[in-house]
Amino acid sequence: LYEKWIGQILDAAGDRYDEVRLYAFSDHGMANCDRHLDLMAKLKELPFKFGVDYVAVYDSTMARFWFLKNGVREVIADALKKIPEGRIMREDELKELRAYFADNRFGELIFLMDEGVLIVPSHMGERPIRAMHGYHPSAPQSYAAIFSNQELPESVRAIPHIYNLMTREAGEAKRLNHRA
């Protein structure tokens, strides 16, 4: 269906312009979510009080923790290691993904769900939804896409590179419009 619509757009633009450059891209993939985990309930079983011993942000696909008292991190980490639907992100992995922050602004410990598992309830919602993004970048459904009727430059290899491509294309369009 998308191929048909894109073909119609190209045909309509081609009827009006000498040159048509089309780019269609996504910022992330989406995974079907058939499994749900009440992570908050599991951690409420521990002998700690939220807001006193630790704080956490429960997103749909990850939980981020900050620890307010000594010894709490180890117990929570041990509990999380027993949950098969996700895993604790290692510091070296976060660094490799350019998601590590020495000041821990996004969490001292990050627990990432397996692709297709939602934390429900979470601070993002009380009810499950059918699909979600925000899993590990190597997860099969996390890949983004870019399609074009132009050859893509070698420099376009990641989502942030699309900005430079679009800036270049906008400059080219402006130049062509001034010539006409």
Image (cartoon, rainbow, N blue to C red):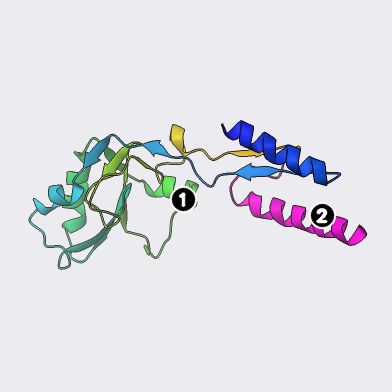
What stretch of residues is rendered in magenta?
153-180
- Residue depicted at x 19% and y 38%: 82
Q: Is residue 55 magenta?
A: no
Q: Quadrant of residue 146?
A: top right
Q: Is residue 156 left or right of residue 28?
A: right
Q: Secondary structure at mark 2?
A: helix
Instruction: Check residue 28 in the rendering and tell me which mark sits there, or answer none.
Output: none
> Which residue is drawn at the image coordinates 49% and 46% (left, top)?
96
Give the residue at mark 1: 95
Whether the magenta-drawn stretch holds residue 154 is answered as yes
Q: Amino acid at mark 1?
A: Lys
* Alpha carbon separation for disc pair 2 and 1: 36 Å
- Tell me which numbered mark, 2 or 1, is placed earlier along the sequence: 1
Image quarter of residue 176: bottom right
Q: Which residue is mark 2?
A: 172
Q: Is residue 153 visible?
A: no
User: Residue 19 in the image: x percent, y percent?
Assistant: 83, 44
**Position of residue 152 measured from the top left corner of the image (x, y, whole percent):** 73, 40
